[in-house]
């Protein structure tokens, strides 16, 4: 994947993450200040409030946040775009539609059949 594409997806993920986190009104102001710093700082701030987030987020948001966090982690570890099941490349088109996709399309289909 091109670096510019990766940056673009990372930006989308960070925005999505921020949106999910700011959905929890009580912690929103804390995150605002952390969000402008490095990702690590934002992560530290987020971790400190994880418990509250998990209590106030709905199931769907919670799952999404976990997927977004995991995708950002993979960008840092340079394993982004790799299927978690078969370790094959996830198609860029799929990542553009679902940047936090964990599986390639065939593994995803297999997963949904089960
Ligand atoms: Zn796969």
Image (cartoon, rainbow, N blue to C red):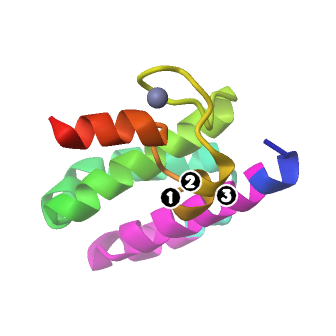
Residue 72 in which image quadrant: top right
The residue indicated by pointer 1 is: 98
Q: Residues within 10 Å of mark 1 (few under 14, many from 20)?
A: few
Is the C-beta of the residue carrying label 2 under 8 Å from the nearest atom of ligand 1? no
Q: Position of residue 9 (x, y in %)?
A: 67, 57
Q: Which residues are magenta?
A: 6-32
Nearer to me, 37 or 13: 13
Quarter the N terminus occupies? top right
- N-terminal of the pair, mark 3 or mark 1, is 3
The residue indicated by pointer 2 is: 94
From the image, state whether disc 1 or disc 2 is nearer to you. Answer: 2
Residue 9: mark: 3
Contact between marks 1 and 2 (CB within 8 A): the answer is: yes
Instruction: Establish if 36 lies above or below 78.
Output: below
- N-terminal of the pair, mark 3 or mark 2, is 3
Contact between marks 3 and 2 (CB within 8 A): the answer is: no
Please tell me whether mark 1 sits on a helix, a strand or a loop: loop
Q: Position of residue 110 (x, y in %)?
A: 29, 34
Please tell me whether mark 2 sits on a helix, a strand or a loop: helix
Please tell me whether mark 3 sits on a helix, a strand or a loop: helix
Q: Is residue 35 left or right of residue 62?
A: right
Instruction: Establish if 111 lies above or below 4.
Output: above
Q: Position of residue 37 (x, y in %)?
A: 68, 58
């Amino acid at each position: 994947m091109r670096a510019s594409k990766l940056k673009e997806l990372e930006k989308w993920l960070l925005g999505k993450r921020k949106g999910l986190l700011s959905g929890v009104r009580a912690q929103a102001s804390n995150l605002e200040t952390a969000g402008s710093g490095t990702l690590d700082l934002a992560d530290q701030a987020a971790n400190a409030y994880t418990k509250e987030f998990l209590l106030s987020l709905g199931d769907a948001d919670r799952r999404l946040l976990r997927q977004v966090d995991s995708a950002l982690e993979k960008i840092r570890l340079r394993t982004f775009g790799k299927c978690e099941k078969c370790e094959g490349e996830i198609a860029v088109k799929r990542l553009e539609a679902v940047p936090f996709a964990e599986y390639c399309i065939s593994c995803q289909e297999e997963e949904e059949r089960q």
